[in-house]
Each structure stands twice: as structure tokens, then as C-alpha cells.
Image: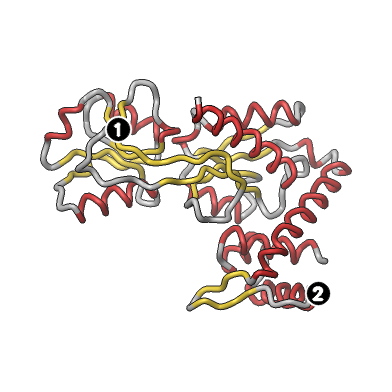
Amino acid sequence: MDIDALRSFIAFVDTGSFTRAAKQTFRTQSAISMQMKKLEEETGHTLFIKEGRNLSLTNQGQELVSYARRLIALHDEAIGHFSLTQAQRPLRIGCPDDYAESVLPQLCQLISDRIPDLNFNIECNCSSKLRSMLDSGELDIAVLTRAPDGDEGFVLKHDAGVWVHGGYPELLEQSPLPLVLFEPDCKFRTTAVDGLEKQGLDYRLVCASSSSTALKGLLREGLGISAMATSSISHDLAIIDEKRLPPLPSVDIVLAIAPRPHPMFGSSVATELSTILLEQSEKATTL
């Protein structure tokens, strides 16, 4: 099977969109369609089924995912082995600011242990921007937040959103409720705001920022309460146990790799490191 066609297939599986798959593989959507048709001819099975306006995988399509990932991983491993010159360039890592103090250091340590001579550059930004940078080839890997039922990336940690304050529980008695939240593309922000509005609770958005450091600074000064992942909470923040506040969603923290991966960091390395981090996370949760 053609490796490029399998990359396009996995790009669709991970993003759920032929539009993003086309961007990631630098092809037109018509070219992607031709590749998918070729894969169907080679397998002798229909791989996609239309559900309303969306396409999903048939049973045979789901079976191909596992084979495709393994074939791509083996291909990338072989290319990496023989691409010593290219391998000298730094690994470009993207990570949301809220995971820069928790998930990112552990990941970087594992990368250093696994590939001692590999240097890396780090870009901190929101998940939507990091996805765009992966699509355009500006990043090699990225730590992202996805819904638990998604297929994107390799799971590093199962997480959930919580309400927090910086040592000022009396803020809960204020009306309107003062909030300091992440930017609109944050799932915790949208859920928090939507939940407050549905429950008829008056609120005031004091500040919105993509910087976890900035939000935590505002929380410590008592400027509001916030909604964030448990992984983002530092020791000086307190979780709010308040039944009248709307519940926040569970999420998965995942590692996504670029369609054209770094020669030293393909799917096999991502699988290995994500498995280690997920096991460490689950072990810590049970302690």
C-alpha cells in the first residue's frame, strides 16, 4: 500500500476532516479522495460510510487503522535510521501553556532519555493554534486537549476540569461571579460559561488569556475564580466544591505528531512514550 495514501487516511481518522487531512498532507481534497478510492480498491472493501453530512469508518475501515499506523510507524523508523543528517535538527514541540509545568517536563525528560542527542524547541500556544501549526509543518509534535471519544493522537493522560480559586473562597458570594478564564477555544471556558447561563447565574468575565501563568497570577490576587484542568492546578490554588457551579467536562491530554514526522520521532516513539506517561498517570491516580 502507498505510504502517502495511508498517511492521508490516518490524517482523516485523527482529525475527522478531509479538509484538515488535505492541509496536513499538502494535497487537494480531490487528491485525497483519489487516494481513498485507491485504498478501497486495494483492500477490496468500502472504508467509509456517510452518516448525515459526515463520513465515518466502516468496520473494514476501522480494521485498516491499526495496520496503517503500524506500517507508517515502521516506515518512519526505517527513514529515521538512515536519515542521520536530517535527524540533527531540533524537535519542534508544541504545548498549551496550562500543561507547560506538568505534562511537558515529563515528556521532554522521556524524549531526552530515549534520544539523548536530540535537542528541541518549544512553542506554547492554545490547542487550536498548535493544530494549525502541525498541519502547516511548523511543529513536529504537540500536546493537545481532545474530547475522550476522539481518535486524535496518543493518550498521555485522562483529565477533567475543575473550578478553582486562589485563596479567596468569598468570591463565590459575589454577584456577578468574577471569572478569569482561558480564551474562547478552551473547552472548560465554553462549558463554564454555557453552564452558568443555563443555570441563570450572573457572572462577569474579568479577564481572558491563553496564558496559564497570567490566570494563576490573577487568581492569587483574588480577581476571580477559574475553570481549568486538574493537571494545570498548582499547590497554591484550591479546588471549589460548590454544587451550584456547573460541572466541567472530562478531557484527554494527547500527543499528536505531524503527518511528515521528525526523522527521529515517528509513530513508534510516540506510542512508546505515551504508554509510559499514561501508565505513570494512572498509577499516580490510584495512590
Q: Residue at x 57, y 60 (%)?
A: 15
Indicate the secondary structure of the residue bearing disc 1. Answer: strand
| Amino acid type indicated by mark 2 | Glu
Q: Are marks 1 and 2 in contact (CB under 8 Å)?
A: no
Label 2, secondary structure: give it.
helix
Q: CA distance from mark 1 to mark 2?
A: 53 Å
Q: Which mark is residue 42?
A: 2
Q: Is residue 47 left or right of residue 198?
A: right
Q: Residue furthest front?
A: 286
The image quarter in which residue 230 lies:
top left
Badge 2, how many Cα within 10 Å: few under 14, some, many 20+? few
Q: Quadrant where the N terminus lies?
A: bottom right
User: Tag on residue 1?
Assistant: none
Residue 70 placement, left or right of 163:
right
The one nearer the camera, 145 or 66, is: 66
**Residue beneath the point at 74% across and 63% down:** 6
Q: Which residue is mark 1?
A: 164
Say above or below: 156 vs 261: above
Q: Position of residue 47 (x, y in %)?
A: 68, 73
Give the image location of residue 167, x and y in percent. Answer: 25, 23
Residue 279: which quarter of the image?
A: top right
Image location of residue 222, percent across then percent down = 22, 27
Specify the quadrant of the image occupied by residue 31.
bottom right
Vertical comparison of 230 with 55: above or below:
above
Q: Residue at x 39, y 34 (%)?
A: 212
Crowd around label 1: few <14 · some 14–19 · many ≥20 (10 Å): many
